[in-house]
Image: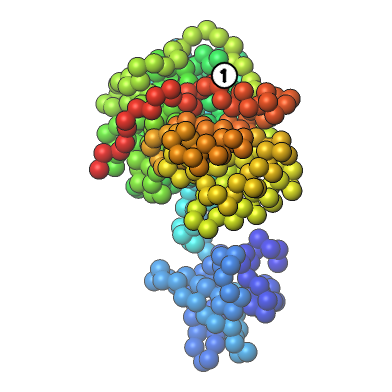
């Protein structure tokens, strides 16, 4: 038996199942203590104990059976394994705008395994198109699988690849680009692509889902219809993120890529524009522009600046923060540190010496705020002034996530720390506001 045949099973229980030539998905009869149980053998999660096997009975209930010296397992059949079979693609309608859907994975490109109840990345952008046939009435869809990963596994290498693929797609004549992405780190990716692909002629819109696309409660179809409409017809040419505005399916809001944050773990309105205005709203088949200033569609060649320095850290200050953490990054040769400080941008006096050493080591440092709304102002209190004297740059109302990406990008696309510092403090993609507007989510 291979590792994939008995995922999660270890030790003596695995030996027993292997000897019985049983694998996950097989119908088994388990004998122990004079009792017998029949059902489909299920996988175990990676961190589960090694002493219980789990089967799903015909009643639909799962039961766990402990290993014992008299435990005996026999294979009595094979279960019908769930298989996703997308319907055929709808015909392409000539004359419609051309939109490319680039899949990177995440919940919107996932499906449920109804044997185990787990969710895993399995669907391509082609599958998404085939189960939302309304897209054929909006645009000529081209689908492209770039990655198939959950968003926790996305890193700067993926951002570099996305930037390259977006530019290639636009040069081939796409009137808009849609990127499907897991929601948990999508805000980092939208910030990265806002910087890595500049001078856009058409919209580049990220989209995700809070429910996998084969669940009845999924928000993926509504999101996809709206973002494909935006990619095909919206008047702006920016990197944006399109998701539900509230709990209903009435409207999709488009957030600026460098000013968006995931603020709820599971709600449909998880994403909010922070310290800025959303770009637009899609409702009842129509667009409503919200932002006063935005980059319009135009004839231009995208400019790629897709290098990111990996040795940059984002450190969240908290009571009792140990400055040895800063020292560890100095010793590891890191080139940049973004602090997520308190209110107006402070950390404790205990950190001063370590920060001074970081400055002497040539490490670029920036300060953001733990507060969701507002901006840092390191001139108000002496602690802030002490930090700026030690080389910590105040980063205005930039989000900590965006600041991390911006510093990685600034260091990756310059030759010296001073050049990177100047680029970090330059407003490239709307990541800074000169004055922070009063904005918050209404309760």
Q: 119 or 364, which is in the foreground?
A: 364
Q: 172 or 297, which is in the foreground?
A: 297
Disc 1 element: strand
Classify the position of the N terminus by image quarter.
bottom right
Q: Residue at left 50%, top 77%?
A: 64
Residue 68: quarter of image: bottom right
Q: Residue at left 68%, top 26%?
A: 418
Q: Residue at left 41%, top 49%?
A: 265
Q: 436 or 361, which is in the foreground?
A: 361
Q: Is residue 295 visible?
A: yes
Residue that lies at the very extreme toward the front in this rendered image: 382
**Residue 349 x, y percent position in the rendering:** 55, 49
Q: Is residue 285 above or below residue 315?
A: above
**Residue 398 x, y percent position in the rendering:** 48, 32
Q: Is residue 277 above or below residue 88?
A: above
Total marks shown come to 1
Q: Is residue 169 above or below residue 113?
A: above
Q: Read off the residue under disc 1.
A: 198
Classify the position of the C terminus by image quarter.
top left
Q: Residue at left 60%, top 46%?
A: 352
**Residue 311 x, y percent position in the rendering:** 69, 40
Give the crowd class for mark 1: few <14, some 14-19, many >=20 residues within 10 Å: many
**Residue 429 x, y percent position in the rendering:** 51, 22
């Amino acid at each position: 038996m291979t590792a994939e045949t008995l995922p999660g099973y270890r030790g003596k229980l695995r030996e027993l199942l292997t000897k019985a030539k049983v694998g996950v998905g097989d119908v088994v009869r388990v004998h122990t203590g004079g009792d017998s149980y029949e059902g489909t053998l299920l996988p175990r999660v990676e961190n589960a104990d090694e002493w219980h096997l789990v089967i799903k009975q015909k009643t639909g209930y799962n039961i766990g059976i402990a290993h014992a010296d008299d435990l005996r397992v026999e294979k009595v059949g094979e279960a019908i394994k769930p298989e996703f079979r997308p319907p055929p693609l709808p015909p392409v309608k000539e004359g419609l705008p051309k939109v490319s859907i680039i899949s990177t994975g995440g919940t919107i490109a996932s499906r449920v395994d109804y044997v185990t109840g787990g969710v895993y990345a399995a669907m391509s952008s082609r599958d998404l198109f085939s189960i939302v046939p309304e897209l054929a009435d909006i645009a000529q869809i081209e689908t492209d699988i770039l990655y198939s990963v959950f968003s926790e596994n996305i890193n700067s290498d993926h951002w570099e690849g996305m930037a390259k693929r977006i530019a290639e797609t636009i040069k081939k004549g796409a009137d808009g680009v849609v990127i499907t992405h897991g929601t948990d780190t999508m805000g980092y990716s939208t910030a990265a692509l806002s910087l890595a692909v500049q001078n856009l002629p058409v919209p580049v819109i990220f989209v995700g889902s809070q429910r996998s696309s084969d669940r009845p409660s999924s928000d993926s179809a509504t999101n996809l219809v709206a973002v494909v409409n935006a990619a095909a017809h919206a008047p702006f040419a920016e990197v944006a993120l399109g998701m539900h505005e509230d709990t209903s399916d009435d409207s999709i809001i488009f957030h600026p890529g460098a000013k968006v944050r995931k603020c709820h773990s599971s709600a449909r309105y998880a994403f909010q524009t922070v310290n800025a205005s959303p770009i637009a709203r899609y409702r009842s088949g129509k667009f409503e522009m919200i932002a006063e200033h935005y980059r319009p569609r135009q004839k231009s060649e995208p400019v790629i600046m897709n290098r990111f320095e990996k040795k940059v850290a984002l450190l969240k200050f908290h009571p009792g923060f140990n400055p040895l953490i800063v020292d560890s990054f100095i010793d590891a040769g890191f080139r940049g540190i973004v602090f997520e400080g308190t209110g107006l941008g402070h950390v404790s006096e205990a950190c001063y010496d370590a920060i001074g050493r970081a400055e002497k080591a040539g490490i670029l440092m920036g300060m953001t705020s733990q507060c969701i709304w507002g901006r840092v102002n390191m001139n108000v209190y002496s602690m802030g002034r002490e930090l700026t004297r030690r080389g910590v740059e105040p980063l205005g109302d930039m989000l900590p996530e965006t600041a991390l990406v911006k510093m990685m990008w600034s260091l990756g696309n310059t030759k010296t720390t001073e050049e990177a510092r100047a680029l970090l403090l330059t407003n490239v993609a709307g990541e800074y506001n000169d004055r922070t507007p009063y904005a918050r989510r209404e309760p």
